Image (cartoon, grey):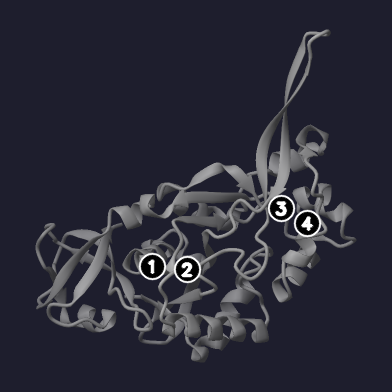
Amino acid sequence: MLVMRPAQMADLAEVQRLAADSPIGVTSLPDDRERLAEKIAVSESSFAAEVSFNGEERYFFVLEEPGSGRLLGCSGIVASAGYSEAFYSFRNETFVHASRELKIHNKIHVLSICHDLTGNSLLSSFHVEPALVHTPWAELISRGRLLFMASHPERFADAVVVEILGPSDEQGDSPFWDAVGRHFFDMRYAAAERLSSLRSRTFLAELMPHYPIYVPLLPDAAQEAMGQVHPRAQISFDIMTREGFETEHYIDIFDGGPILHARTSGVCSIARSAVAPATIGAGSRSGRLYLLGNGGLQDFRASLVELDWTPGQPLRLSAETAALLGVGEGDSLRLVAL
């Protein structure tokens, strides 16, 4: 059994191993020891802070194999995107060009750079080892964040977004970047993303075109890449769309990957989650697989447990499962069916 918990500084070496395996473009998970140490330190401070509204907090979680201490995945939440630096995206729009005299009426797809998503909470830093991609454990490290948000709504915005990695090849080239961004920076996509992960995306984004980009003028490869998903990001995309995130309005300004958006209260794992007390003893021998979170902050724990549970009744947990989740008799847990 694996457990999801807040990252600690002692995890640094394992987190860097995960970061080294993450695909190009996941700038929130840089393969840089100093930046990762800073990321964990900020997360520890965020979990420890007393918070009454969403601000600059950044929460970082890891998926641990308790017996060995090995980390198999990670994920994060930014409480408020754009709090300390601008959060840019391209908005899909339609311009109308018409001539009454010629009786021509054309609708043209354009991209407009915007700050529309600033202030939304942002799901970030998702990565799971390849062996777990098509298992329920990938759901745990992704959706466990949503249970944490449901338990602490005051810490997050009314809307939430997630950036999905767009297409790039094994050499680190992106057709969308080559058609748009590379005209403004004399560097390849991989180099631009590396620079962004070590410093900030903002200083590069500020040099991007701030006038609408007419999509029909872009090469076919760039147009085809817009809104498409990198194969290694497909699992994240699939989980989030099942959660009710919308996919059509925004794309990433670097690789053209989709930016998903949802009202926090409407996200399935939040809206459908329930709270129930635990009773410790013999666990369920059969039943449905549930995602369970203990509702804590610094001691937050979440895992997957097979339960024969009836709404309105206590959760019957084994002593081993209760210890893994850090709960005792009568403690409340939040759960949602997998």
Amino acid type of the residue tagged 2 in the rendering:
Asn
Q: Earlier in the sequence, mark 2 or mark 3?
A: 2
Q: CA distance from mark 4 to mark 1?
A: 40 Å
In the rendering, at what x and y percent does residue 235 appear? 50, 55
Query: Which residue occupies 42% across, 86% down?
Result: 69
Q: CA distance from mark 3 to mark 4?
A: 15 Å
Please identify the quarter of the rendering in which residue 187 is found. bottom right
In the rendering, at what x and y percent does residue 125 appear? 55, 68
Q: CA distance from mark 2 to mark 3?
A: 25 Å
Q: CA distance from mark 2 to mark 4?
A: 36 Å
Name the residue carrying label 4: 173
Name the residue carrying label 3: 253
Q: Quadrant of the C terminus?
A: bottom left
Query: Which residue occupies 11% across, 68% down?
Result: 314
Q: Earlier in the sequence, mark 3 or mark 4?
A: 4
Residue at disc 2, secondary structure: loop
| Discs 1, 2 touching: Cβ within 8 Å | yes
Q: Is residue 25 above or below residue 14?
A: above
| Discs 3, 1 touching: Cβ within 8 Å | no
On the rendered structure, is 190 left or right of 15?
A: right
Callout in the foreground (3, 1): 1
On the rendered structure, is 325 left or right of 62?
A: left
Name the residue carrying label 1: 154
Name the residue carrying label 2: 54
Q: Earlier in the sequence, mark 2 or mark 4?
A: 2
Amino acid type of the residue tagged 1 in the rendering:
Glu
